[in-house]
Amino acid sequence: MRIASPYKNILVTGGCGFCGSAFVCFVVDSAPDVHVTVLDKLAYAADLDSIAGLSKDGVELVVGDVCDSNLLERLVPGHDAIVHYAAESHNDNSIADPAPFIATNIEGTYTLLQAARAFNVRFHHISTDEVFGDLALDDPRKFTEESPYRPSSPYSSSKAASDMLVRAWSRTYGLKATISNCCNNYGPHQHSEKFIPHSIACIQRGERPKLYGDGLNVRDWIHVEDHARAVWSILTKGAVGETYLIGAN
Ligand SMILES: NC(=O)c1ccc[n+]([C@@H]2O[C@H](COP(=O)([O-])OP(=O)(O)OC[C@H]3O[C@@H](n4cnc5c(N)ncnc54)[C@H](O)[C@@H]3O)[C@@H](O)[C@H]2O)c1
């Protein structure tokens, strides 16, 4: 289905990653009048195949770092929206070495916010429900936009910090920004380090998948294309200054 867009040129950071590439594919397939620029530093989790089949007219890849303010100064003008997916995204890696998480997730978000502010560009920040920590297994409540932040790993703390920066730039500088906190994603092109691909690979090798704790934990999972559609709705219909939670219940 062809969809109308209020934006003509969208910059998607991390658009070669698992979630970002699903969003890029959704936009290029559904809104062919929109031009998408992907900014991605092609870190280990990037998968060029995930956007390889798209029309070259609809999407351009710029290989670079969201922490590079000089690059952003050249790249951001001419875009009317930024959707910020780029991140270090794997919890276990953040425990082994937090430094890249602080650099990309916090400093990178700051650098991008400054560029969005300088050129008055609509900004959507992709975040995670992991900023809310976890609930007891028998707790009937769900996270809401009002839930307190209780991040528990270097990854989730860095995402929580980036959310706070976005709120501050929205309130202090009037940046037209929204945030979405999504639950766990599954779907094509997910890196093999993540829970579902990793568990499948273990089973294929005849090994038991690794579960944390007693294995009774409950998680909410959403298909990555549903996440992409939700982000598009927020970008095009969401109220500036708001935070939205995305989940599959
Ligand atoms: N995967 C999930 O289940 C999930 C759930 C909720 C929210 N999110 C959020 O979605 C976003 C993307 O997650 P993902 O699972 O697609 O991650 P991913 O690791 O698959 O992809 C991240 C992408 O960002 C790029 N990147 C990393 N550092 C960069 C930098 N400094 N400059 C430019 N590009 C850089 C990588 O090369 C990669 O292509 C993250 O912000 C994450 O917090 C993910």
Image (cartoon, rainbow, N blue to C red):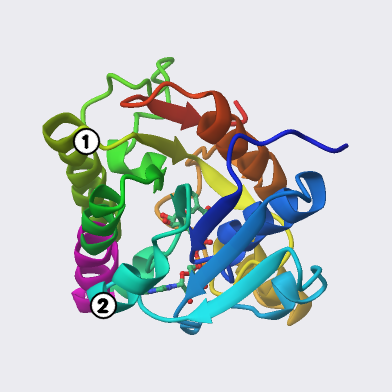
Q: Position of residue 178 (x, y in %)?
A: 38, 34
Task: Name the amino acid, label 2.
Answer: Asn
Residue 105 in magenta?
Answer: yes
Q: Which residue is mark 2?
A: 70
Magenta portion: prevailing SS class: helix
Q: Which range of residues does the magenta coloring cover?
A: 96-110
The residue sitting at 52% across, 35% down in the picture is 235
Q: Is 201 on the left or on the right of 218, as rendered?
A: right
Whether the magenta-drawn stretch holds residue 175 is answered as no
Given residues 170 and 57, the one toward you in this image is 57
| Mark 2–mark 1 distance (CA, rounded to whole Å) | 24 Å
Kind of element beneath mark 2? helix
- The residue located at (23%, 53%) in the rendering is 118
Q: Residue at x 49, y 84 (%)?
A: 44
Q: Quadrant of residue 164?
A: top left
Q: Is residue 247 above or below residue 86?
A: above
